[in-house]
């Protein structure tokens, strides 16, 4: 179960795969989530290997499913439980990208709290023989903030942990996450509450704990450009990393990615992480463009190695 004071790597589609999760766990993240994985996809085509790959080093790990139908989600959860034995099955009730909303899945369900309860109830029932609990990741509502009603339905249905990105689906990533509402949810919840939204520095982690009294704090986008944020929080100090150390992180991540995807695919996918990790680093703008224009794996690695030689300190 989530312990008071945990700092958690947020799920982020196409970034937080097994390699990135392992590196963040090693830097001090207490818990990880897979990115959202389609329940219907699992029922039709089986478990997607690349998205589902994880190692014991990433535990406790929540395997996140999304769908539009309680029965399908529960059935997919059983397949995952039997084959992968994650620590939790998580249900995504927050994704608000148009492609997903069109299928009436994920964030769409925020419009109907009783349906969210139904998804959790069926999944909890189906997973009982496996002893795997169900967590949920929500937003405050779809257009209207209905957080209390949502939390009540999920709890009645047997949810074990609730993570809340403190915005509505309609807001997307605009405006400011409303931490006050995390505090309100914590007050009425009988299960651990994880807060998410706009944690930018290790001091924000402290501040979210203080201001909301939540049990866990999730770090999303900030961890992409600064995976050392977990260590910073544990050690209560700023850690400055130069281009060279950032490129070492990328090379380690690449090596870990090769365990579960081809060399070329990993080299193509890591480019977005390179952009993130060099964000705001003085002198790195042109370097970033130079590296991501590499045409193949060999060229990419050569350019990352070249970048390592530039010893500019991030201040
Ligand atoms: C690129 C990206 C991908 C995301 N993918 C997921 C996802 O697969 N599942 C999920 O529950 N949330 C997803 N989120 C939401 C984050 O988990 C988090 O709740 C949100 O980014 C707010 O936290 P932050 O301000 O710390 O980034 C994603 C966010 C981003 C930026």
Image (cartoon, rainbow, N blue to C red):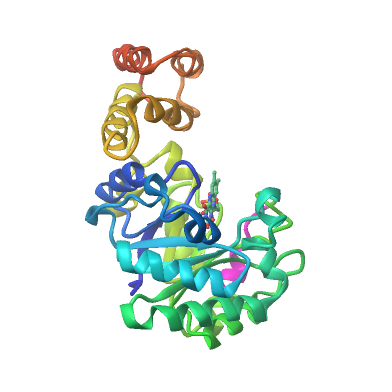
Is residue 95 in view from this perspective? yes
Quadrant of the rendered image containing residue 7? bottom left
Question: Residue placed farthest to the right in the image?
Answer: 143
Location of the C terminus (image quadrant): top left
Residue interval drawn in magenta: 176-183
Camera-side residue: 270 or 228? 270
- Residue 153 against residue 278 in the figure, above or below: below
Closer to the camera in the image, 300 or 49: 49
Q: Is residue 228 above or below residue 86?
A: above
12 shown above or below 264: below
User: Where does residue 260 sit, x and y in percent of width and height?
Assistant: 31, 40
Assess whether residue 54 is covered by the magenta stretch.
no
Residue displayed at 28% across by 60% down? 59
Residue at the front extreme, as displayed: 44
The residue shown at (30%, 22%) is 244
Task: Give the main secondary structure of the magenta stretch.
Answer: helix
Residue 78 falls in image quadrant: bottom left
The residue at 71%/49% (across/down) is 98
Q: Residue at x 38, y 24 (%)?
A: 264
**Is residue 193 visible from the viewing direction of this image?**
no
User: Going by the image, does 38 lie left or right of 130?
Assistant: right
The part of the image, by quadrant, that contains residue 295 is top left
Residue 221 rendering spot, x and y as whole percentages? 50, 44
Q: Nearer the viewer, residue 264 or 250?
A: 264
Instruction: Pinpoint residue 301: horizontal percent, then vertical percent.
Output: 32, 17
């Amino acid at each position: 179960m989530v312990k008071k004071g945990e700092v958690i790597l947020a799920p982020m589609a196409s970034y937080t795969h097994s390699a990135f999760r392992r590196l963040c766990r090693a830097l001090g993240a207490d818990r990880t989530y897979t990115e959202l994985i389609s329940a219907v996809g699992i029922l039709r085509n089986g478990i997607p290997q690349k998205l589902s790959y994880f190692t014991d080093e990433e535990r406790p790990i929540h395997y996140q499913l999304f769908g539009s139908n309680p029965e399908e989600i529960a059935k997919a959860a059983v397949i995952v439980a039997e084959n992968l034995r994650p620590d939790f099955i998580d249900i995504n009730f927050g994704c608000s990208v148009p492609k997903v909303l069109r299928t009436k899945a994920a964030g769409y369900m925020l419009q109907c709290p009783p349906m969210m309860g139904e998804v959790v109830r069926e999944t909890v029932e189906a997973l009982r023989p496996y002893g795997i609990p169900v967590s949920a990741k929500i937003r405050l509502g779809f257009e209207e903030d209905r957080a209390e009603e949502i939390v009540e339905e999920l709890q009645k249905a047997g949810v074990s942990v609730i993570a809340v990105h403190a915005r509505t689906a309609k807001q997307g990533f605009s405006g400011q996450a409303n931490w006050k509402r995390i505090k309100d949810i914590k007050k009425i919840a009988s299960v651990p509450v994880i807060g998410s939204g706009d944690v930018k520095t290790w001091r924000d982690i402290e501040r979210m704990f203080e201001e909301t009294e939540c049990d866990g704090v999730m770090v999303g986008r900030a961890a992409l450009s600064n995976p050392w944020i977990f260590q910073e929080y544990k050690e209560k100090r700023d850690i400055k990393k130069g281009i060279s150390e950032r490129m070492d992180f990328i090379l380690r991540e690449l090596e870990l990615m090769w365990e579960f995807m081809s060399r070329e695919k990993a080299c193509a996918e890591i480019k977005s992480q390179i952009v993130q990790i060099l964000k705001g680093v003085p002198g790195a703008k042109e370097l970033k463009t130079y590296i991501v224009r590499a045409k193949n794996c060999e060229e990419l690695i050569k350019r990352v190695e070249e970048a390592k030689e530039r010893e500019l300190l991030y201040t």
